[in-house]
């Protein structure tokens, strides 16, 4: 693949976009409300926060359902076939809504659009779509919306550029927690993955820009930041001085934001320096998402993962030595082309050995354009489905066993909302990444609470408060 340089979106280009925003605002028939439908990962969720930020700045209010909105954006994912099919199914369904609201505008953006020829295909097949744009063009939403409002024809813009746009407006989903994208794209070309083709070459944001954003979030009272990138462990490549991810974490740790998390890490880039920072920092949470994908060396080789089982297990051991009790989670693909029962058993044995706090398990889904899609010996669906059932059963058991270590432990919960089971209880995530439910009320949402874990119920830790409040005192 040819060498490509990241393209910084200039101040001038962003100023132009603000000019388009003002023009949209001045249009009498502009949409008054919006709804963003998000598919896929946290990167997409954060992109949706930026879309919402720009739409708010164009005078639109957020509608709680798509039926109530004048402008609906589908921010799509193409990592798995079912996410793509669901997105297209929902776009089709909106055609009916449009019959009731002829002014409804529909946009499709995100990874799916970035696939070669996809934007044109969508516009041709789904004639009621007004706007289609790729991940690199997200910052151009004001301009594209203005063009769509001024024309009867669909507006399509997909650039084959690896852009970095700083300082876009963001409308955050939560006030207490925030995402910060530290890098974009991926250079790893795992043989099953479409991300490098749709999100472009790996490029990191300047450390100074990340620190400034984190500082502003801290000053706004944010209690937890989540650093995002397809492979955060390789942060800094290509920047002047090549700062490492460990160095970035050390700097962020010094800002005194109560909680710092990150995602996703590639095992091949998990350095000793990063493990050391994990063990000595004050605010980096004791949790690590380390996708293993398979426990078999031959499958890992054909996945182009560039580590083997022994190296992976060695990294897990080092992490556990540096951060005792660390919360470990993973991703696993079952039924990769050619996977034999014996090779699958290596994955089972690894899952048994590690004892993850949770695992995201997937049946391999071929993605056009990737190397694995053209590999011979695709595993029959029935075989893959039988394997994943066995894997889930094992993981459920190991998860329960792993979670037992928390019983009796003091923890801290960042409350996300009322518990689904009781209005006198609240739920959130503990420092190790596991869900915790404890007594509390709506007043506690967004707060950090001290608790002691008392028992495990349905993969959730149940806890009592150690701050003397049981939720009924301040109802
Ligand atoms: S590291 Fe591999 S799986 Fe992750 S985004 Fe890059 S290519 Fe895809």
Image (tube, grey):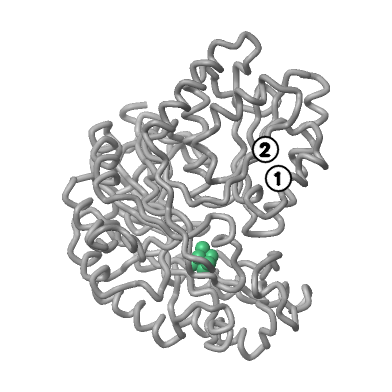
- Crowd tier of the residue under label 2, counting other residues whose Cα lies within 10 Å: few below 14, some 14–19, many 20 or above: many
Report the disc number at residue 131: none
| Residues at marks 1 and 2, CA–CA distance in whole angstroms | 7 Å
Q: In the picture shown, does residue 449 fall above or below 276?
A: above
Q: Quadrant of residue 346?
A: bottom right
Query: Is tag 1's residue or tag 2's residue first in the polypeptide sequence?
Result: 1
- Is residue 135 visible in the rendered structure shown here? yes
Residues under numbered marks 1 and 2 in contact, where contact means CB atoms less than 8 Å apart = yes
* Residue on which the image places disc 2: 156
Q: Relative to 178, does residue 406 appear above or below in the rendering? A: below
Circle 1 sits on which residue? 119
For the view shown, which residue lies furthest in the bottom direction?
342
Left or right of 209 in this view: 197: right
Query: What percent of the width, then of the height, locates residue 197?
Result: 58, 60
- How busy is the neighbourhood of tag 1: few (under 14 within 10 Å), some, or many (20 plus)? many
| Residue that lies at the very extreme toward the top in this rendered image | 28
Q: Could you tell whether 314 is left or right of 347 in the image?
A: left
Q: Is residue 178 left or right of residue 54?
A: left
> Is ligand 1 within 8 Å of the beta carbon of the residue shown at mark 2?
no
Between 263 and 9, the one nearer to me in the picture: 9
Residue at 28% x, 44% y is 209
Local secondary structure at mark 1: helix
At 54% from the left and 74% from the top, the residue drawn is 293
Vertically, is 215 above or below 410?
A: above
Residue 288 image offset from top left, x and y in percent: 37, 64
Q: Quadrant of residue 365?
A: bottom right
Image coords of residue 117 (percent x, y): 72, 51
| Residue 407 seen in the current view | no
Image quadrant containing the N terminus: bottom right
């Amino acid at each position: 693949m040819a060498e490509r340089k990241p393209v910084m979106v200039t101040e001038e280009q962003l100023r132009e976009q603000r000019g388009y925003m003002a023009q949209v605002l001045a249009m009498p028939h502009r949409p008054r409300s919006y709804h963003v439908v998000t598919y896929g990962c946290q990167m997409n969720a954060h992109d949706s926060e930026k879309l919402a930020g720009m739409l708010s700045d164009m005078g639109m209010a957020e509608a709680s359902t798509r039926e109530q909105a004048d402008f609906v954006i589908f921010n799509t994912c193409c990592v798995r076939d079912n996410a793509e099919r669901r997105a297209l199914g929902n776009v089709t369904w909106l055609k009916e809504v449009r019959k009731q609201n002829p002014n409804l505008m529909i946009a499709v953006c995100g990874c799916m659009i970035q696939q070669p020829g996809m934007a044109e295909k969508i516009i041709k097949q789904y004639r009621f779509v007004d706007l289609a744009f790729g991940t690199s063009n997200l910052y151009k939403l004001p301009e594209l919306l203005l063009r769509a409002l001024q024309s009867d024809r669909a507006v399509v813009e997909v650039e084959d550029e690896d852009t970095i746009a700083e300082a876009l407006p963001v409308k955050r989903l939560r006030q207490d927690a925030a995402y910060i994208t530290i890098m974009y794209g991926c250079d790893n070309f795992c043989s099953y993955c479409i991300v490098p083709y749709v999100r472009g070459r790996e490029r990191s944001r300047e450390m100074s820009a990340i620190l400034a954003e984190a500082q502003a979030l801290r000053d706004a009272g944010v209690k937890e930041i989540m650093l995002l990138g397809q492979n955060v462990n390789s942060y800094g490549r290509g920047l002047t001085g090549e700062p490492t991810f460990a160095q970035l974490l050390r700097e962020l740790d010094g800002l005194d934001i109560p909680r710092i998390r990150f995602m996703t890490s590639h095992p091949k880039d998990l350095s000793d320096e990063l493990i050391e920072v994990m063990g000595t920092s004050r605010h980096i949470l004791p949790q690590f998402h380390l996708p293993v994908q398979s426990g078999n060396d031959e499958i890992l080789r054909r996945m182009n993962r560039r580590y083997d089982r022994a190296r992976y297990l060695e990294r897990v051991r080092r992490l556990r030595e540096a951060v005792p009790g660390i919360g470990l989670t993973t991703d696993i693909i079952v039924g990769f082309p050619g996977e034999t029962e014996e090779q699958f058993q290596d994955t089972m044995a690894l899952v048994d050995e590690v004892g993850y706090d949770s695992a995201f398990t997937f049946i391999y889904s071929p993605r056009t354009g990737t190397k694995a899609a053209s590999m011979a010996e695709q595993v029959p669906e029935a075989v893959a489905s039988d394997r994943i059932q066995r894997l889930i059963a094992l993981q459920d058991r190991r998860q329960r066993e792993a979670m037992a270590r928390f019983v009796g432990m003091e923890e801290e919960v960042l409350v996300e909302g009322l518990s689904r089971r009781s209005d006198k209880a609240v739920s959130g995530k503990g420092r190790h990444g596991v869900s915790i439910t404890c007594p509390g009320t709506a007043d506690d949402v967004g707060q950090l609470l001290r608790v002691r874990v008392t028992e495990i119920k349905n993969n959730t830790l149940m806890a009592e408060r150690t701050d003397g409040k049981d939720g009924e005192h301040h109802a």
